Image (tube, rainbow, N blue to C red):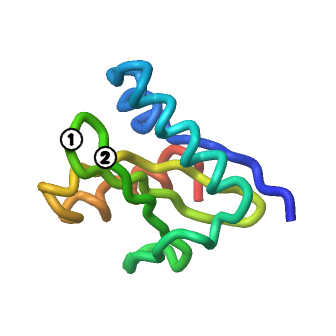
Amino acid sequence: MSYRIKSLNFFKKQIEKLDFKSKKIIYDKIQLIKQNPYRFKRIHSKKYSKVFRVRFSINKKETRLIYVIIDPNIILVCLLDRKKGYRDLEGYLGKLRKELGL
């Protein structure tokens, strides 16, 4: 199946603030997601059933890229700082509904 990558405005704003090396790491992870979106760990959400995370390190900080699969789209939601945990995740997923009209 061919998936289309979409991203929330919030995700785009987070990416803008990063340096070139960090953007390259994220780009490579997105390419892996495109090849097989189910390869990374699934996380639990109250709102969506197909929420996944990609684990990596940016500037020596553990970071997670959160994405949701809503066929035929892969929606890049946000970058989470692992130190803060997943407390804000449901709020970010709420933005998904508003922005994409789901």
Label 1 environment density (alpha carbons within 10 Å; few <14, some 14–19, many ≥20): few
Which residue is found at the position 31% from the left and 64% from the top?
Answer: 90
User: Disc 1 designates what residue?
Assistant: 60
Q: Amino acid at mark 1?
A: Lys
> How far from the left and from the top, in percent, is residue 91?
29, 57
Label 2 environment density (alpha carbons within 10 Å; few <14, some 14–19, many ≥20): some
Relative side of 71 to 55, left or right: right
Relative side of 18 to 31, left or right: left
Q: Amino acid at mark 2?
A: Ser
Which residue is found at the position 86% from the left and 65% from the top?
Answer: 1
> How far from the left and from the top, in percent, is residue 18?
35, 24
Q: Is residue 91 above or below residue 16?
A: below
Relative side of 72 to 10, left or right: right
Residue 55 in which image quadrant: bottom left
Cα distance in 3D space between marks 1 and 2: 6 Å
> How far from the left and from the top, in percent, is residue 71?
74, 66
Q: Is residue 85 above or below residue 16?
A: below
Which residue is found at the position 52% from the left and 79% from the top?
Answer: 49
Q: Is residue 51 above or below residue 101?
A: below
Determine the secondary structure under disc 2.
strand
Which residue is found at the position 62% from the left and 65% from the top?
Answer: 69
User: Disc 2 designates what residue?
Assistant: 57
In this rendered view, identify the residue nearer to me: 43 or 57.
57
Asked whether the residues under the numbered discs 1 and 2 touch, taking CB atoms below 8 Å apart as contact, a structural biologist would say yes
Relative side of 30 to 11, left or right: right
> How far from the left and from the top, in percent, is residue 79?
35, 46
